Image (cartoon, helix red, strand yellow):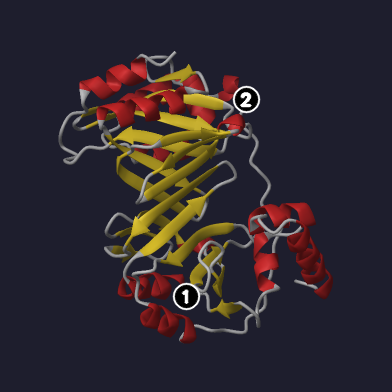
Amino acid sequence: MTTPDLSQRWRALRADKPNLRTRDAAAELGASECELVATLVGDTAQRLDGDAASLLHALESVGRCMALTRNESAVSEVRGRYGGIELGAHAGQVVGEHIDLRVFLDHWRQTFAIEEPHPHKDGERRRSIHVFDRTGTAVHKVYLEPDGDAAAWDAIVAARVAATPVVIEPPPRRPLERADDTVDVSALHTAWDAMQDTHEFFHLLAAHKLARTQALRLAGESRARRVGNDALRTLLHQSAELGDKIMIFVGNRGCIQVFSGAVKRIVAMGPWINVLDPGFNLHLREDRVAQTWVVAKPTRSGVVSSLELFDDTGETIALVFRKRDDRDLAEDPAWRARLEGLA
């Protein structure tokens, strides 16, 4: 529940720190980002209904957008169009022009539309939609691009305005990791080596009741090898120099966003390593990377190798793969060699 006091404290904080992002302001004020956005309802924000599936289908009509998905340590921003939407009862995918998402709709709980003065373009308005989970944490955001269809956007918002209250729940308790000596490591190795598709890895973790980092730690060096936490920076620079097409996965419990393509402009700014390209931006806090692994998973087409980054709680920050235009093709051996060459 938002309060007038929170609204006043946020107004004072914005006056003192006008460039502070809403997520960071929420942390300073001891509130969720959703609660701060809710204080804007009646001014620059409108509360929308909770029909996430309908919203995703409707976004196909608005043309170019910027899709933003993040977690505590990384932000992915991709410009393109929503489309190719296939949704089940709880999960689905969006595979439009450049915008590629895996969505878990049980976590799409609270939605707002915001229209505000553009922070970087005088005289222009910025339209966006913000989706939050039950804890008030953002799972996905959509920003209409200047060449998008503003009339279609406004019609989508107008049809979904709702007066439902904001309810924030405490975050779920993080499950405790099993003791290593209770894990049947031989069975884990056998199941790992029997995988036919990388997506089977999630079932392997569930079947053996393992956290992802614990599975990597117990997999053996032929399957998972720990490398330095500067490995992503090295790999991005190599990929930019060689013109590699890569896939970068950044997500949270409600949405995983996938960028596919070449990266060009790699820029370090303080603790952040950034990709700053016209259609794709990545911002990742290197100082929050606690573990980095080179991982090899078997598939029908051969081994698929990835670089996987985790924070100090074991949460996934980002995954990086070599893009294959045909999933039936074997992995480029030069990609595997670059990963094997990481210290």
- Determine whether the residue tagged by mark 2 lies in a helix, strand or loop: loop
Q: Is residue 253 left or right of residue 62?
A: right
**Residue 236: which disc?**
none
- Determine whether the residue tagged by mark 1 lies in a helix, strand or loop: loop
Residue 189: horizontal and vertical position, in percent? 39, 22
> Which is in the foreground here, disc 2 or disc 1?
1
Q: Amino acid at mark 1?
A: Asp
Residue position for label 1: 51
Q: Can residue 133 be seen at all in this image of the molecule?
A: yes
Q: Residue at x 58, y 22 (%)?
A: 180
Residue 178: horizontal and vertical position, in percent? 61, 30
Q: Measured along the vertical axis of the image, is residue 151 above or below residue 172?
A: below
Q: Residue at x 57, y 58 (%)?
A: 138
Residue 254: horizontal and vertical position, in percent? 50, 56
Q: Measured along the vertical axis of the image, is residue 135 above or below residue 302?
A: below
Task: Judge the density around disc 2: few (<14), some (14-19), many (≥20) Cα neighbours within 10 Å.
Answer: few
Most distant residue in the front direction: 122
Image quadrant of residue 326?
Answer: top left
Which of disc 1 and disc 2 is earlier in sequence? Answer: 1
Q: Is residue 284 left or right of residue 19?
A: left
Q: Quadrant of the N terminus?
A: bottom right
Q: Is residue 153 left or right of residue 97?
A: right
Residue position for label 2: 179
Q: Nearer the viewer, residue 31 or 300?
A: 31
Q: Is residue 249 left or right of residue 119?
A: left
Q: Amino acid at mark 2?
A: Ala
Image quadrant of residue 290?
Answer: top right
